[in-house]
Amino acid sequence: MHNYIINDRVMFNTFTGGLSRLDDPRKLSTLNSNAKRLFLRLIDSGYQIVPFEQLTSEIEPPENVNNTAKDVVSELSGITQAFHQLGEFEPILTTYSYGVQLSTDVELKVITSYRTFSDDSKEKPYIAKKSLINSATVNGNNDTSTTPPPKSRFVWYYTRIALVATLFIFVFYFALDMFTSKPGYFADYHHQEKYQKCDIFIHNQKPTDLANLKKRLDEFAIACDSPKNVYFSLPADDRRESIQVCDSDPDKSNAPCFNFYVVKVK
C-alpha cells in the first residue's frame, strides 16, 4: 500500500491513517478507520463524484444498524477537522443532494519507503558428497599390463588426490561466484556531479534538470551531510520520477537503498 504527500505539505500514512506536516512533524492528526477508508475511496475515484450510496459500504456500522448518508457525512466531517488541525484547507467537496469528491485543488504524490539489495534468499551452490575418486583407483586395481613399482604407485596415487582436490576447489569457488554474483543494477547510471556529499548519478546520461533533483532531495529530507549515492531516473513520458538513495555502491556491496517515487496524479 502506498503513502501520499498532499500538496507538498502533508504526509498521509495509508496504513495508520496518520496525517503529519512535512515542515513541522510535531503537528499530527489521525483519521479513524472509517474516515481513512472513505478518504482512500475518494483518492481512488480520481476527482470524480462518488454517490453516498457507494460510500456507505466503506464504513463499518454499529451492530444491527444500517449505514446512512448521515453517517457518511459525519465521517467526512472528521476528515475536514483533521486537516483543519494541521492548518490545511478542506480536501473534499460535498454535493449534499448526491455525493462527494476529492477537491481538484488537492495534488497527490505517491511514495514508497524502503528497498534493499540483500542476497540472503539465493540458494547456495550444490556440492557433491560422493567421492570423485574411483574405488578401483583407491584400491590400486589396474588392468594395464605395466604395473608401476610400489613407491611410484604411492606417489602417483597422492598426486592424483592433490590434482582432484585442486580441481574441486577451483570448481567450487567458480560456482560460488556464479551463484552469488549480482548483475550490475546501476550499470546504466552515470555520474553527473556532487551535491554536498552526495554523488548524483543520472540514468542513461539523459539530460536532467539537476535543480529539480536537488529540490526533491530537500522535499524528502534526504541529508547529504554524509557520503551517499543518489540514482535519478526520469522516463520519457515525464509522469514518474524515481530516486534511489544508497549508503554506498549497491553493485559492490549489500548496501541498503531507500526508494522514492513521485507519480504526478493530477
Image (cartoon, grey):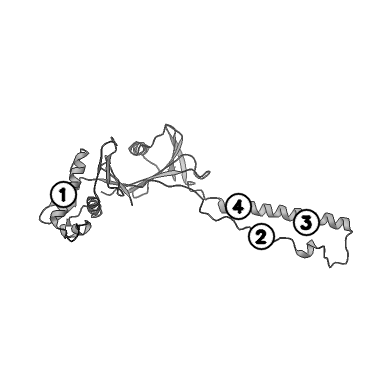
Q: Residue furthest front?
A: 63
Q: Residue furthest left?
A: 97
Which numbered marker is on residue 176?
A: 4
Q: SS for tag 1?
A: strand
Which numbered disc flags the more N-terminal residue, 1 or 4? 1
Pointer 2 with pointer 1, Cβ within 8 A: no
Q: Amino acid at mark 2?
A: Lys
Q: Position of residue 92 (x, y in %)?
A: 18, 48
Pointer 4 with pointer 2, Cβ within 8 A: no
Q: Amino acid at mark 3?
A: Arg
Q: Position of residue 54 (x, y in %)?
A: 19, 59
Which numbered disc flags the more N-terminal residue, 4 or 3? 3
Q: Residues within 10 Å of mark 2 (few under 14, many from 20)?
A: few
The residue carrying mark 2 is 129
Q: SS for tag 4?
A: helix
The residue carrying mark 1 is 93
Q: Position of residue 55 (x, y in %)?
A: 19, 57
- Give me the residue at 42% from left, 47% from top: 115
Which numbered marker is on residue 160?
A: 3
Left or right: residue 255 compared with residue 141: left
Q: Amino acid at mark 1?
A: Leu
Q: Position of residue 29 (x, y in %)?
A: 24, 42
Left or right: residue 101 compared with residue 129: left
Using the numbered discs, state the Cα–Cα distance from disc 4 to disc 3 in whole angstroms: 24 Å
The residue nearer to you, when weighing 4 against 197, is 4
